[in-house]
């Protein structure tokens, strides 16, 4: 049976715990990576969380595999990763993907608004 978007989101939300902006800030202070998976035009239009690293959702697999020639050195399976997108759906799916790729500690912050509402600074994209 084919999976629907609803099925994929349910599995992602079950596998990747949500984290508050306050808890995210504490983990970032300890070395966690805040990863923005929105597309470039979204960053340009809405700004980005201060200190966030950007990899669009469409390139994540290529950047997250440490053995790939396109690997991003900021992504390491042993590093805590906190993802966000615009509303939380893509970050949940991206988090599940990272867990499937062997990343040990992955969290979903939700959307950029969750970061801002939790007192996080947003800067120009």
Image (cartoon, grey):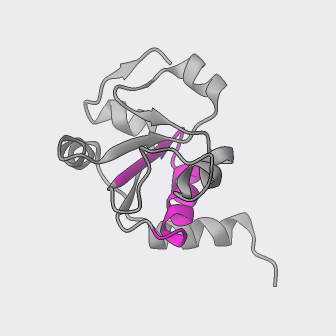
Question: Along the horizontal axis of the image, is 51 left or right of 54?
Answer: left
Picture coordinates of residue 22, whole percent (x, y): 21, 43
Locate the N terminus by quadrant. bottom right
Name, please, the residue furthest toward the top.
124
Q: Residue at x 65, y 23 (%)?
A: 41
Q: Residue at x 61, y 26 (%)?
A: 42
In the image, residue 44 sits, relative to residue 55, either above or below, namely: above
Question: Along the horizontal axis of the image, is 102 left or right of 115?
Answer: right
Q: Residue at x 28, y 43 (%)?
A: 21
The image quadrant of residue 119 is top left
In the image, residue 43 sits, relative to residue 109, either above or below, namely: above
Residues 101 and 110: in front is 101
Residue 92 included in the magenta stretch of the image: yes
Which stretch did the figure color magenta?
81-102
Picture coordinates of residue 114, whole percent (x, y): 38, 39
Residues 49 and 117: in front is 49
Question: Along the horizontal axis of the image, is 48 left or right of 45?
Answer: left
Name, please, the residue furthest toward the right.
1
Question: Along the horizontal axis of the image, is 16 left or right of 5?
Answer: left
The image quadrant of residue 117 is top left
In the image, residue 77 sits, relative to residue 73, either above or below, namely: below
Picture coordinates of residue 103, whole percent (x, y): 43, 65
Picture coordinates of residue 121, whole percent (x, y): 31, 24
Q: Residue at x 44, y 35 (%)?
A: 53
Q: How many marks?
A: 0
């Amino acid at each position: 049976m084919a999976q629907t978007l609803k099925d994929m989101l349910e599995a992602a939300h079950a596998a990747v715990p949500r984290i508050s902006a306050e808890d995210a800030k504490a983990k970032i202070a300890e070395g966690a990576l805040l990863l923005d998976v929105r597309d470039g035009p979204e960053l340009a239009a809405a700004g980005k969380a201060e200190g966030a690293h950007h990899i669009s959702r469409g390139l994540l697999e290529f950047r997250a595999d440490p053995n790939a020639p396109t690997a991003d050195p900021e992504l390491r399976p042993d590093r805590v990763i906190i993802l966000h997108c615009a509303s939380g759906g893509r970050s949940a799916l991206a988090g599940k993907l990272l867990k499937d790729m062997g990343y040990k500690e992955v969290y979903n912050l939700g959307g950029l608004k969750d970061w801002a509402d939790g007192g996080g600074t947003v800067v120009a994209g």
